[in-house]
Image (cartoon, coloured by chain):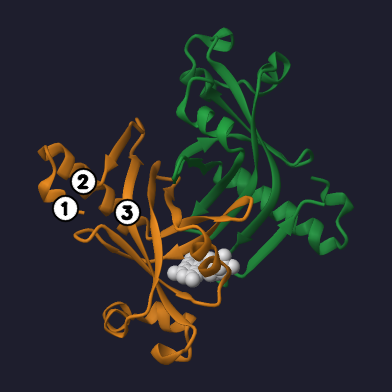
Chain colours: A orange, B green
Amino acid sequence: MNAESGDTVARGQAWEKLWALVKDIRTGMMTTVDGQSLRSRPMTGHAAPKEGEIWFFTRSSSHKAGEIEASREVNVAYADPKLQSFVSVSGRARLVYDRVKVDELWNPFVSAWFPEGKDDPDLALLCIDVEQAEYWDGPASKMIQLWRL
Amino acid sequence: MNAESGDTVARGQAWEKLWALVKDIRTGMMTTVDGQSLRSRPMTGHAAPKEGEIWFFTRSSSHKAGEIEASREVNVAYADPKLQSFVSVSGRARLVYDRVKVDELWNPFVSAWFPEGKDDPDLALLCIDVEQAEYWDGPASKMIQLWRL
Ligand SMILES: Cc1cc2nc3c(=O)[nH]c(=O)nc-3n(C[C@H](O)[C@H](O)[C@H](O)COP(=O)(O)O)c2cc1C
C-alpha cells in the first residue's frame, strides 16, 4: 500500500488511521456480488498494511468462494457505531493456497473454525488487494477518501 | 415483509429478531456498485418492518444517488462487533420524492444534515425494498437466513 510513498504527510497519516481502524474493529462485513444481489457476511481477518492487503481464512467450498470466482470486486465495511467510526474498503479478492502463509496467519481463533487443522482440504486463504478506501471517524465524521497509488 | 405470513412461528420470530437488530444498531453500511468497484458508506435510517422497507434521507445530487440509478441492487450491513451481532440486508433501492413521507420521517437528526429544511430542493428519500436478509447473533453466531415471501 505504501503509505510512505504518499504525496503528502497527511496522506500517509490518513492511511495509518485507516489501518488502525481496520485493526481495532477487526470484524468487517464483506460484500460480494451474488448473481443479481449483493450479500455481506462478517469476516475476521488479518490486516497487512504494508502490502495493502487483508487476509482471511475461509472454506473453498463456501458460497462466497464461488461468488468471488464469478466477480472479484468486493467491499469490506468496518463499523463501530458506539465510537462513530466507519471504514469502507474496496478491493479485488482472490483465493490463495499457500502453506507458508497459512503457517504465518494461523491462530487459535482460526483453529476453532477449522478443527481438522491446517491440513483440512477445504481450507483456503482469501486475500483482498485494497484499491480504494474511505473512512469516517469521530463525532464530526468527515469523510476521508484514499486511493492506492 | 409480512412476517405474519411466515410458514412457521420460528420464521416470524426470526424476522422480528432481524428488525430488532436493525433498529438497535441503527447505522448501517450501505454498499452500492460504483462502476467496477463496490463502495459502502454509513447510513442512519428508519426501519419499516411491516412494509419490509428501510428509509433514508439523502441528497439527489449525491454520488450514491447516481450509483443507484445505474444499479439498484444494494446491501446494508449492520454490525455491532462488541455484541457480536451482524446483519446483512439485500434489496433494491429507489429514490422517492414524497412530501407526506418526508413529514412522517423528519427528525432533529435529519434537520442537522439539511439546514435548509424540508424544502431543500436537493432533499430526497432513498427507500430500500428488502429482498433477502441474514443475521448472526450472539457468541455462537449461527447464521439465520431469510427470504421475502
Ligand atoms: C464474528 C464472525 C467472524 C467470521 N469470520 C469468518 C472468516 O474469517 N472467514 C469465513 O470464511 N467465515 C467467517 N465467518 C462466517 C461467515 O460470516 C459466514 O457465515 C460463512 O463464512 C458462510 O458465508 P457464505 O455462505 O457467504 O460463504 C465469521 C462469522 C462471524 C460471526
In this rendering, is residue B74 above or below A2?
above
Given residues A105 and A132, the one toward you in this image is A132
Q: Residues within 10 Å of mark 2 (few under 14, many from 20)?
A: few
Q: Position of residue A91 (x, y in %)?
A: 37, 53
Given residues A97 and B140, the one toward you in this image is A97
Residue B138 visible in this rendered orientation of the protein: no
Q: Which residue is mark 1?
A: A2
Quadrant (top left/top right/bottom left/bottom right) for the N terminus of chain B: top right
Q: Secondary structure at mark 3?
A: strand
Q: Which residue is mark 3?
A: A130
Q: Which residue is mark 2?
A: A149
Q: Are marks 2 and 3 on the same chain?
A: yes
Mark 2 to mark 3 CA distance (whole Å):
11 Å
> Of the residues shown, which amino acid type is indicated by label 2?
Leu
Contact, mark 1 vs mark 3 (Cβ under 8 Å): no
Contact, mark 1 vs mark 2 (Cβ under 8 Å): yes
Q: Position of residue B91 (x, y in %)?
A: 66, 44
Q: Secondary structure at mark 2?
A: loop
> Of the residues shown, which amino acid type is indicated by label 1?
Asn
